[in-house]
Amino acid sequence: MSQDLFKNAQELLEKVQAFATESKDELERFRIDILGSKGKVRQLFGGMKAIEADKRKEFGQLANAVKQAAETKLSEIRELIEDKADETIKVPDMFIPVNQQGMGSRHPLAVVMNQMIDIFTRIGFVIEEGPEIETDWYNFTALNTPENHPARDMQDTFYINRMTDPAMLLRTHTSAAQSRVMKDRKPPIRIIVPGRVYRNETISARAHCQFHQVEGLYIDEGVSFADLKQTLLYFAREMFGEHTNIQLRPSFFPFTEPSAEMDVSCFVCDAKGCAICKHTGWVEILGCGMVDPKVLENCGIDSEKYTGFAFGIGIERTTMLRYKVDDIRLMFENDARFLRQFSSTL
């Protein structure tokens, strides 16, 4: 009986030493067959009780030799298979032509806004920003529009919480940032505030609940309406062409007095009359005026010493006029077909 066990162990050792493969699956079967929980090595050690006492040590050494040989063989073959797999990994051909992707372009709103910013920064205006979630005081009260003032009806507001003190809302104009600057800084002040604003309006081809503005503010000693007119004439000619003319029409805004709407001579038909200007030769693009003394006082600025002007330009309106877009909703839908039309013009 013991001779058969010794013979089987010796044959198993020779089988293990002679084993070779290049297959991971076959190697795994070898591991299970030899070293598994029910494998042949476990059976060898289990048969040791049938060996005579004086031969158990010798048999144990032989069984250990089988086990070590199997573990060594398993490790060596596994490394060879992994090394061979690494050698067969293909190096990508760096000269294969790739699929060409079309060049993107900036959004037309961003282009027009950046052009406006560039024009005003060339004449000394500094860019300022403010939060889109604003307090009622900065958005309305500081700008001479106290609670229950009828002018509040001009701007349908998205209130976040009217019960807090102060009430919180989505700003209806970037003038709210001007309030912050005037309250925290002493004149001279010469700033522009570009940004997104919100109004609770029905979305249509001509109106949207969100849009963009560039607001301007200049406060110093001796600032006059003539300074405002000259600044806006410079802007109009830089933006729409050197032959552009402007006209100012009386209007009303609670935070400026006097107030005006500004028209530019139609840059589409050269002021001859077309559908864009409704055959008047003029296109309205912004509102403006001299800062109301009450606004200066609300923000802690001496209205006896300082005067100033302000203006607000709608980016969407200017962009639509410039590129003859007849639906404001196209500006917010991110339709690639619409945006692709501007890739060669922006």
Image (tube, rainbow, N blue to C red):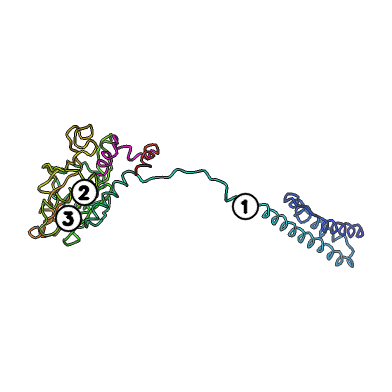
Q: Amino acid at mark 3?
A: Tyr
Q: Is residue 148 left or right of residue 68?
A: left
Q: Nearer the viewer, mark 2 or mark 1?
A: 2
The answer for how far apart the CA atoms under marks 1 and 3 are is: 63 Å
Question: Mark 2 — residue?
Answer: 235
Tag 1, which secondary structure?
Answer: loop
Find disc 3 in the rendering and name its residue.
218
Q: In terms of secondary structure, where does tag 3 sit?
A: strand
Camera-nearest residue between 103 and 60: 103
Q: Is residue 102 left or right of residue 214?
A: right
Q: Residue placed at 41% from the left, 45% from the top?
A: 104
Secondary structure, mark 2, is helix
| Cβ atoms at labels 2 and 1 below 8 Å apart | no
Residue at horizontal 13 percent and vertical 47 percent from the top: 254
Part of the protein shown in magenta? 312-335
Location of residue 283 in the rendering, given as x and y in whole percent from the top left corner: 19, 38
Numbered disc in front, either 3 or 2: 2
- Give percent across and percent down for residue 148: 14, 45
The quarter of the image holding the C terminus is top left
Mark nearer the N terminus (1 vs 3): 1
Residue ID for mark 1: 91
Residue 240: % across, % down: 24, 44
Q: Image height check: is 174 above or below 58?
A: above
Q: Quadrant of residue 74?
A: bottom right
